[in-house]
Amino acid sequence: MDYLAFVLVLPFVLASIHVLASGLRGCKSCSPRLPPGPKPFPIIGNILELVGNQPHLALSKLSKTYGPLMTLKLGSITSIVISSPDLAKEALQKHDQVFSSRTIPDSNRALNHHKFSMGWLPTSARWRSLRKVSVTQIFAPQRLDSTQSIRRKKVQELLDHVKENCNSGQAVDIGRAAFTTILNTISDTFFSTESAQYCSNASQELRDLIVGITEEAGRPNIADYFPALRFVDPQGARRRMTIYNRNFFRILDGIINERLQLRASSKGSKASSDVLDSLLDLTEEDNSELSCDDIKHLLLDLYVAAIDTTSSTVEWAMAELLHNPEKMAKARKELEEVFGKDGVVQESDISKSPYLQAVVKETFRLHPPAPFLVPHKAEIDVEMCGFTVPNNAQILVNVWAMGRDSSIWPNPDLFLPESFKRDPVGLGGEGKRVSSAGSIATGSSSLNSEIPAELPDLSSPRRVLGAGGAVWVRRALEGLRRGPTRRREH
Ligand code: HEM
């Protein structure tokens, strides 16, 4: 039904957009001087440049021709692509104020999430108040200190799971295991409960919902390039996201209602003091700006922002180490020297492991979880390098291209933690919109002491790692497990 409507309406809408756009474009001399870019086709613009599953790579290649400040017309959306650290700094620091809005993917309008969400609201008073809530209630040093034991416990559970699999000669899907660890860490920190098991047969509704939401959010949607098509939702993205969000909120409603009853029955004496309790305390203050709806949307943001970014980083770090046995040996040696052979890695001791830190930074450089950050939007015309970044343009900061720039990194495609001299460019963003998270996942550091010391020959690691993302890594890991393994002696 959706598809039929799409097919019937599309030609009419595209023709109208074209006529209107040509009429409104007016005289050429009045148009702003946009940064250079490939010539756009009528109506679709440069969308074809992005066909394929690696838009960051495609735009990186284009920037070699058109320069680090480039214009692309994606359907009816003017997009400015920034591919150099200096220009990224200029955009995210100097012009932070006017570039800190967002272009909102249509699927994020499901159940009006964009009107409540810290990640999608413009930097208004409402956004500031949500940001303040997350800084004071979730990422405050006292909270991070008091929840450290939860993270330690969750990392230990991950290690036990890996060890169990090693003992029985089973393949471990590291990305999936890290995903479970982070999901449980967040659920335990927020509501003192668990949400998923490592065993894949167990029912894990929350986990499946987060996977669904993350995949839906990452899928290209034609309605984002032609906002006039939003009302038909041609690919059904908003419809699917509505179902996911509704189910997610149903689970949260259950947890929140149960907690409210517990609080009512404990008559003032606090039953627990996790993040949910602190947020509910805030909603009960006089003139509170925070409602239960705000809490649900905030938690949706945090689950989605935290889990895939962190687990994919753990997965890539492990994959790079597995493909670079000498780097793995060096990282293990450092861990053994700092923490002892069976020692537990403590968050407070991470500074004693510079090589491990370099491994994580090098992983971020080669595999940034958000290769374009989260797209920003210009709120007024802004001059950059003698060009105009026009009002309403979408700003894509291609951190992937910067991490692979051979004028900055001598061997940009090699995994070389030891030659790490400078931080990769603002991988969690810069300025107002910088990622809310501190360093929460310590999984990767402990994890590499559980990997067998003897590795099979993976003769062309670059080919395995070069293209297809996590699925290749999973295959590489499975291949690894099928090969000869020798468990570490404990
Ligand atoms: C490997 C880990 C992570 C990476 C690489 C990462 C990266 C990012 C990036 C690139 C942005 C967009 C910045 C911009 O727009 O300029 C962002 C935003 C955000 N991140 Fe993270 N993130 C990570 C982990 C987390 C975690 C663990 C949480 C929460 C528990 C989190 C919460 C958020 C939130 C709420 C935003 C939206 C902030 C806003 O728009 O005001 N992130 N993150």
Image (cartoon, rainbow, N blue to C red):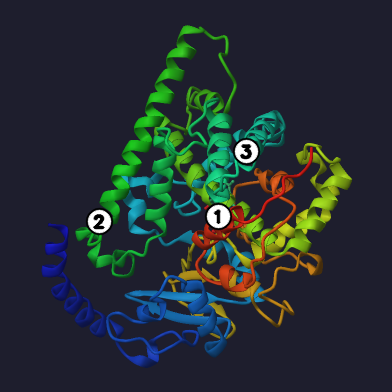
Q: Residue furthest front?
A: 484
The quadrant holding residue 144 is top right
Q: What residue sits 75% from the left and 52% below the top?
A: 453
| Front disc: 1 or 3 | 1
The numbered mark at residue 311 is none
Label 1 and label 3: CA atoms lie apart by 18 Å
Q: What residue sits 60% from the left and 60% below the top?
A: 429
Q: Residue furthest right?
A: 337
Q: Are marks 1 and 2 in contact (CB under 8 Å)?
A: no
Label 2 and label 3: CA atoms lie apart by 36 Å
Considering only order in the chain, which callout, 2 or 1, is on the residue closer to the N terminus? 2
The secondary structure type at the circle numbered 3 is: helix
Between 229 and 193, the residue placed more toward the observer is 193
Give the mark count.
Answer: 3
Estimate the x, y position of residue 352 in percent, counting from the top left.
86, 48
The numbered mark at residue 478 is 1
Label 1 and label 2: CA atoms lie apart by 34 Å
